[in-house]
């Protein structure tokens, strides 16, 4: 399989070899930053049991909070597709932005402008130190792929991981259909 360069905006698909890693098992991660100092991403397909109003009671919103990764799980992060409405956003890739002015976000949530099609919240993030992600790629922990989604916010559950493995073909197809816990088979 042809390798894809690691750059922000790409997706990381967890290799079946990390099935025992509870943080990254069956993950699809949006790489939101990659530079000489390291990499940051958000797990797109692991919804938590929380909604936004559970964490911030003054915001009346039932938007699902996703588990972004094992780093800084006490902090809330967000990505969105509306930089003109959320000042100070950082561009990840075409049409996807990270962070921005939270007061603006709160106002947009209050007037119901934001929904699951244009914003996603995460507890924590996934992080790699300098060269760590490349080392993990070399040991077959991840596959880097181009983002083919018209709307990244459609990635919502474990079927996303399975669908990516099916597209990769070969032995990946076998793993795509394996039960999450092989001991239950």
Image: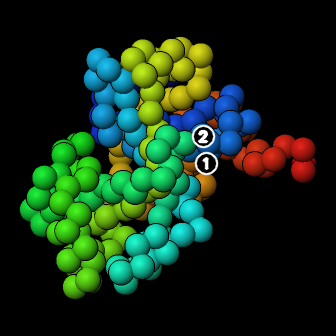
Residue at 42% over, 79% down:
57
Q: Which mark is residue 133?
A: none
Q: Is residue 36 visible?
A: yes
Q: Residues within 10 Å of mark 2 (few under 14, many from 20)?
A: many
160 sits to left or right of 6: right
Looking at the picture, does residue 62 appear above or below residue 148?
below
For mark 1, what is the residue? 162
Of badges 1 and 2, nearer the viewer stands 2
Q: How is the image coloured?
A: rainbow
Where does residue 62 sit, x and y in percent of width and height?
A: 44, 79
Residue at 68% over, 36% down:
21
Where does residue 183 sit, x and y in percent of width and height?
A: 90, 44
Between 24 and 161, the one lying in front of the other is 24
For mark 2, what is the residue? 24
In the picture, residue 113 is in which quadrant?
bottom left
Where does residue 131 sit, x and y in percent of width and height?
A: 42, 15
Q: Which SS class for mark 2?
A: loop
Residue at 33% over, 56% down:
78
Q: Which SS class for mark 1?
A: helix
């Amino acid at each position: 399989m042809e390798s894809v360069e690691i750059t922000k905006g790409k997706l990381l698909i967890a290799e079946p070899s990390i099935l025992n890693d509870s943080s990254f098992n069956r993950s699809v991660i949006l790489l939101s930053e990659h530079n000489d100092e390291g990499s940051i991403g958000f797990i797109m397909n692991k919804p938590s049991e929380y909604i936004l109003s559970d964490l911030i009671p003054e915001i009346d919103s039932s938007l699902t909070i996703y588990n972004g990764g094992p780093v800084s799980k006490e902090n809330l992060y967000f990505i969105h597709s509306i930089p003109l409405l959320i000042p100070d956003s950082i561009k990840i890739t075409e049409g996807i932005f990270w962070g921005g002015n939270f007061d603006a976000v709160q106002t947009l949530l209050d007037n119901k402008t934001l929904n699951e099609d244009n914003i996603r919240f995460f507890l924590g993030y996934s992080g790699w130190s300098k060269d760590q992600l490349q080392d993990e790629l070399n040991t077959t922990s991840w596959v880097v792929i181009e983002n083919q989604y018209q709307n990244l916010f459609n990635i919502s559950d474990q079927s996303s991981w399975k669908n990516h493995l099916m597209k990769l073909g070969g032995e990946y197809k076998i793993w795509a259909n394996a039960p999450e816990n092989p001991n239950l088979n």
